[in-house]
C-alpha cells in the first residue's frame, strides 16, 4: 500500500500532472486526443518515442485499435504501434 501511495504522490506532484484521470494509452478510446503525462519505457524506448516527436506534454490521438495494435497521430504523422509500446505511454484525456 505504501509503495502505491508513493507512486501516486510522485505523479501528482510531477510538473506534468494536470489533475483528472491518468491512464495508459493502450486503455484509451478511438478518436480521443490525449496529453502525454509520462513515458514509462526504457531509455531506448523513450529515445524511439522522441524520434517520433512524442514527449511529455505533447498531444497524441488514438486513431484506431485492432488486434492489440494501435494507429496514433503524433503531430503531423500517423504511426502504427504495438500494444506493449502503447502501454508505456501514460496519458490524460484532453
Image (cartoon, helix red, strand yellow):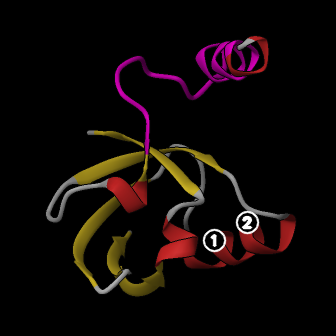
- Whether residues under marks 1 and 2 lie with C-beta atoms below 8 angstroms apart, the answer is yes
* Residue nearest the viewer, comparing 59 with 21: 21
Residue indicated by mark 1:
49
Would you say residue 83 is visible in this rendering? yes
Residue 34: x and y in percent read 33, 48
**Residue drawn 71% across and 23% down?**
7
Would you say residue 76 is visible in this rendering? no
- Label 1 packing within 10 angstroms: few (<14), some (14-19), many (20+): some
Residue 93: x and y in percent read 28, 40
Assign the C terminus to one quadrant of the image: top left
View extreme (front): residue: 1
Residue 86: x and y in percent read 49, 67
Please tell me whether residue 62 is drawn above or below residue 91 in the rendered image.
below
**Residue drawn 52% across and 61% down?**
87
The label on residue 46 is 2
- Specify the segment rendered in magenta: 5-23
Amino acid at each position: 500500500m505504501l509503495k502505491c501511495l508513493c507512486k501516486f504522490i510522485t505523479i501528482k506532484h510531477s510538473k506534468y500532472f494536470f489533475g483528472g484521470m491518468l491512464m495508459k494509452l493502450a486503455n484509451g478510446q478511438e478518436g480521443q486526443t490525449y496529453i502525454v503525462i509520462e513515458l514509462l519505457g526504457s531509455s531506448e524506448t523513450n529515445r524511439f518515442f522522441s524520434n517520433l516527436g512524442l514527449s511529455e506534454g505533447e498531444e497524441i490521438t488514438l486513431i484506431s485499435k485492432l488486434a492489440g495494435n494501435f494507429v496514433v497521430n503524433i503531430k503531423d504523422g500517423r504511426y502504427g504501434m504495438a500494444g506493449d509500446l502503447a502501454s508505456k505511454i501514460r496519458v490524460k484525456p484532453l
